Image (cartoon, helix red, strand yellow):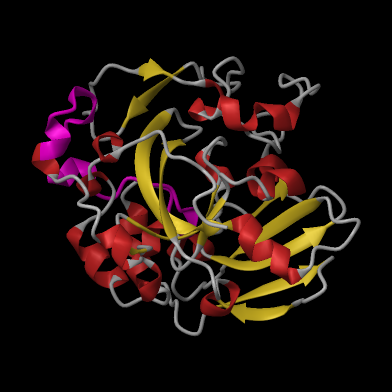
Amino acid sequence: MAHRWKNKLGPADVTPKSAWLSRRSLIAGAGLTGAGLAGAGVLGMGMPGRAEAQDNEELVPNSFEDLTSYNNYYEFGTGKRDPADNAAALDTSDWTITVDGLVDNPGQYTVSELLDGLTPEERIYRFRCVEAWSAVVPWNGVELADVLAPLGIQDGARYVAFETVVQPENMIGVRRQVIPFPYVEGLRLDEAMHPLTLLATGLYGEPMPNQNGAPIRLVVPWKYGFKSIKSIVRISLVEEEPPATWNVINAREYGFYSNVNPNVSHPRWSQAEEREIGGGLFAAKKPTLMFNGYEDEVASLYDGMDLQEFF
């Protein structure tokens, strides 16, 4: 059921590849599980080079050094450079995902087994971090709904819970216990089944780099980035709202829904504007869009809800 969603963004909107990936991380990710999931069609799309990106005034990249190693993955440290510096040790061999809860076909599945018969496609999505920075990312993956449906979702399932991998021997942040691990997240079932919600296996036509959540991660583009849990090892269909790491740590600052909403400030900063990485540290901020620009597609999911209360 691929290609149900029509992309409004194009290659010119993509944040330059160098803004996300260091050369070393690309090499490290080249042999990971799921390498065959970035299809030939994706690789042949002609992603923009640096010169092409410079034609877009909003996407003029910083220096290579400035633009590498800028993401959050606390299992590898809390600094923006830490994931790229420390994630090479992540062991993605023999990766399996446990599926349990209210499904007819629970079990342990390899990534290939979960995606059997599905065609990965490219989705160019806006990405908005709760820290008020943003990017445009070309993900490769499949709709989560197409993975869940064959598992046989049972009556009574109302939420989907996710859990990320914990490898203390390979994750310096886990050993430091900077936050509770494993990192957990959750979606309402209708959010999980929405055509925009992806299980991503790569970006920029490459297998998913370790620091971005190899070998498979969630992508929910209308929510703040921390909802898009990385390196998934468990998917559970459940009846009750599952715990979500940042909501558990500080519910006053991080709601369960965490939809991008410029009208609801974080208690310590405004969410009305964002800084796009790749535009330079001193680039002008731009207004944040309701639901990160996907309002037409997802606003109906929240009809009748007070988004000030259910933030």
- Residue 12, horizontal then vertical, whole percent: 24, 35
Q: Residue at the spot x=76%, y=24% of the render?
A: 303
Q: Is residue 276 left or right of residue 185?
A: left
Image: 253 above or below 77: above
Dividing the picture into quarters, in which one does residue 39 lie? bottom left
Magenta residues?
52-78
Q: Nearer the viewer, residue 57 or 240?
A: 57
Q: So how many labels did they put on this image?
A: 0
With 256 as the anchor, is 39 left or right in this view?
left
Q: Position of residue 113 (x, y in %)?
A: 57, 79
Q: Is residue 181 visible?
A: no
Relative to 104, residue 247 above or below: above
Residue lying furthest left in this view? 51
Q: Position of residue 159 (x, y in %)?
A: 78, 51
The answer to whether residue 190 is above or below residue 299 is: below
Q: Residue at x 30, y 54 (%)?
A: 204
At which x and y percent is residue 177?
56, 58
Q: Nearer the viewer, residue 126 or 174?
A: 126
Q: Is residue 164 above or below residue 104?
A: above
Instruction: Please state, as top left, top right, bottom left or bottom right, where the C terminus lies in the image.
Output: top right
Asked if residue 221 shows in the view, the reply is: yes
- State left or right for residue 138 relative to residue 59: right
Residue 211 on the magenta segment = no
- Residue at the (79%, 23%) spot, across then down: 305
**Extreme right residue here?**
156
Quarter of the image with the N terminus is bottom right
